[in-house]
Image: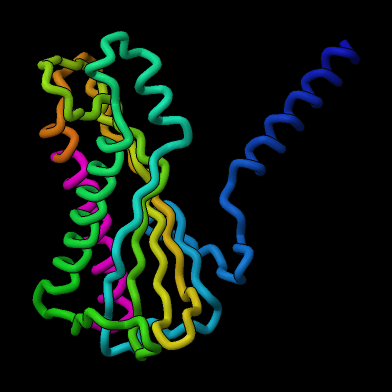
Amino acid sequence: MIKLWQYMMSLSAVVLLSACASQAPQETHDGLVLQPDTRFKEVYLLPGADLGSYSEFGVADCTVAFRKNWLRDQNSSRVDLSRRVTQQDVDQIKDNLGRDCQQYFRAALQEAPPYTLVDNFDNGEAVLVVRPGIINLDINAPDTMSSGRSTTYTTSTGEMTLSLELVDGTTGQVLARVLDRRRAPEMGRLQWTNGVTNKAEADRTLKRWAGLLRDGLDQVTGR
């Protein structure tokens, strides 16, 4: 009985330590502090930062990065060499998604009442720069440039994580950082997945992220 009790206590300790390890850190390496009760998964803010003091805003190009080994894993199950995903496919997906990402954030800031957007903010202007990025992109059934026709069925289109920073255009100081992982809903059954369905799901996620950012800025600026 004593050994069983000791085993249960040890197991509970392991579970507790694992849960603590999986929690988001309370402070980042550059001094940003985790904020409670946010609509994004994680929001970090620099203590004393006044996001409401800016009158001009800029949206930087959106960077895109796939999940590690995504290309290798995709091609490991493709016997037909003509259907392999190429680096050209990867680059095109990144370019298209990055362009759409930037457009959604710009569109959200231009909704009435619009924020003042500027395109040049690399020379130390007093601008709050929105710097979006997508990391850990994982597309289950990407379209390729191969000429052959194929049909792919999956239960989900995939997932991606937003890594967004709000940066002071004068100093380059990161004032806020957002992390938000979104996975497409599991349909519970196999469905045909292609470039059209992938883009539709990505658009829904990008629009949601852009809307949440707009809502947050409206709160801190008093709009």
* Residue located 20% across and 28% down the image: 144
Image-based side of 197 in relation to 182, left or right: left
Quick check: 119 above or below 55?
Answer: above
Q: Position of residue 87 (x, y in %)?
A: 32, 35
Magenta: main secondary structure: helix
How is colour applied across the structure in the image?
rainbow
**Quadrant in the rendering for residue 83:** top left
Q: Quadrant of the C terminus?
A: bottom left
As drawn, the residue found furthest toward the right would be: 2
Image-based side of 206 in relation to 122, left or right: left
Q: Where is residue 31 in the image (x, y as percent from the top left)?
A: 61, 71
Image-based side of 29 in relation to 151, left or right: right
* Residue located 36% across and 13% down the image: 77
Magenta span: 200-223
Along the line of sight, which residue is nearer the eye, 26 or 129?
129
Confirm whether the magenta stretch covers residue 216: yes
Q: Position of residue 170 (x, y in %)?
A: 43, 88
**Quadrant in the rendering for residue 56:** bottom left
Confirm whether the magenta stretch covers residue 90: no
* Residue located 33% across and 88% down the image: 54
Quick check: 62 above or below 81?
Answer: below
Q: Where is residue 209 in the image (x, y as percent from the top left)?
A: 27, 56
**Quadrant in the rendering for residue 51:** bottom left
Along the line of sight, which residue is nearer the eye, 96 or 152?
96
Quick check: 215 above or below 204?
Answer: below
Q: Quadrant of the N terminus?
A: top right
Along the line of sight, which residue is nearer the eye, 148 or 161?
148
Quick check: 157 above or below 113?
Answer: above
